[in-house]
Amino acid sequence: MKKLESNILIDASPETIWRVLTDFENYPAWNPFIKLIAGEKEVGKSLNISIKPPGSNGMSFKPVILKFEPSKELRWKGKLGMKGIFDGEHYFILQRNGKNATNFIQGEVFSGILVWMLGSTLDKTEEGFNLMNRALKEQCEKKKTIINNLV
């Protein structure tokens, strides 16, 4: 088993971040890691996801949503081939930090017999988490600035 986790403080409310995070259709415009995400946003439903960690060819998979709690947590679990070969439980957690800031945590717990063989790939995946977190921060803080200027 191996766990990767990346977090960032975003100067925006969990509600603002949730709107950007769950606006799957716009991922290609801002997300350098998750290039495509589509599907129903409901527990038990499958998503179609394509990721491209830095320096890799990328991959596509169809995880099942385990948790979809607005402004708090999105979690899914996917597998490579059969269960137990290479499984990953991915999560996004939003924790309010003060009035208008949020700790954004992205992570994944990998399990299965191939985890030990994919060490360098997982290092690139962690780099992808960091890139996505920074892009999400930029996107959300830009959105917050636009909203504040309208008020």
Image (cartoon, rainbow, N blue to C red):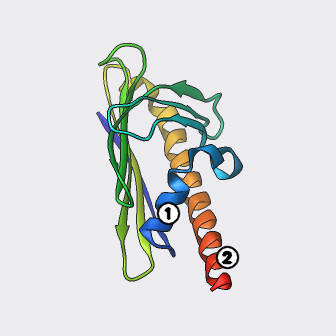
Q: Residue at x 61, y 30 (%)?
A: 58
Give the image location of residue 3, x and y in percent: 34, 42
Give the image location of residue 133, x and y in percent: 53, 57
Q: Residue at x 37, y 37 (%)?
A: 76
Q: Quadrant of the C terminus?
A: bottom right
Distance in Å between CA atoms under marks 2 and 1: 14 Å
Mark 2 or mark 1, earlier in chain: 1
Q: In the visual, does 146 lie left or right of 117?
A: right
Give the image location of residue 74, x and y in percent: 38, 48
**Residue at numbered disc 2:** 146
**Residue at numbered disc 1:** 17
At label 2, the amino acid type is: Ile
Occupied quadrant, residue 59: top right
Number of the label disc, if any, that sits on residue 106: none
List the single residue furthest toward the top. 82
At label 1, the amino acid type is: Ile
Residues packed near mark 1 inside 10 Å, few (<14), some (14 to 19) or many (20 plus): many
Q: In the visual, does 35 lie left or right of 21?
A: right
* Picture layout, residue 108 above or below residue 117: below
Residues packed near mark 2 inside 10 Å, few (<14), some (14 to 19) or many (20 plus): few
Instruction: Compare residues 45 and 83 and report the one nearer the observer.
Output: 45
Give the image location of residue 64, x and y in percent: 37, 30
Q: Regarding mark 1 in the picture, which secondary structure is present there?
A: helix
List the single residue furthest toward the right. 29
